[in-house]
Image: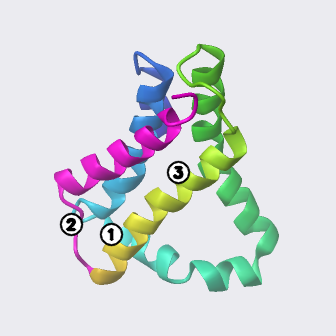
Amino acid sequence: EHLERRMADCATHLEAVECWIRGMLARAQEPHRPTDTRPFVLNGMRLAYEFPAESLAVDEALRAPLREALRQAAAAGELTEPDIGRDVAHIVQLTLGHMTWSLIQRDPLRPADVDDVVAFALAGLRRRGT
């Protein structure tokens, strides 16, 4: 809910996408947060296998604000030729991949790392139609 409120305050829908990415990666930036997140990341595959319906519901709740921001960005003309489902999948995998690796390695992401992930994701969204 906190992330969704922050996303709603953004000036553009692509800024809301950036906010989603930064909010997710914040879990791997702050020294006290990984202890809250690491057990779920490290056991995620097992939990998904044992509790598939619950895992899908959590995944959908995670993706929903990002999907909505991308839909609104497309409707506002901020994106050309979007493929919302594919774009959501790519951004989620890119973002969670960095977060997961950082947590596994116990190596907090630096602000420059987060900036690079954001820039890469947004460049990918803008690449179509150019």
Task: Decide: is 94 above or below 18.
Answer: below
Task: Give how far apart the Cα atoms at labels 1 and 2 are.
Answer: 6 Å
Asked which quadrant contains residue 93, the reply is bottom right
Q: How is the image coloured?
A: rainbow
Residue tagged 2: 31
Residue in the image at 47% along x and 59% along y = 94
Q: Quadrant of residue 100?
A: bottom left
- Residue located beneath label 3 in the image: 91
User: Residue shown at 41%/21% (left/top)?
Assistant: 10
**x, y (%) of residue 88?**
62, 47
Location of residue 62 in the rendering, given as x and y in whole percent from the top left corner = 60, 51
Residue marked by disc 1 = 34
Cα–Cα gap, marks 1 and 3: 21 Å
| Residues at marks 3 and 2, CA–CA distance in whole angstroms | 24 Å
Which amino acid type is marked by label 2? Pro
Magenta stretch bounds: 106-130
Q: Main secondary structure of the magenta part?
A: helix
Q: Name the residue nearer the viewer: 28 or 32.
A: 28
Q: Earlier in the sequence, mark 1 or mark 3?
A: 1
- The residue type indicated by label 3 comes to Ile
Residue 69 coordinates in the image, percent (x, y): 57, 30
* Residue type at numbered disc 1: Pro
Mark 1 touching mark 2, by CB under 8 A?
yes
State the residue lying farthest toward the right: 53
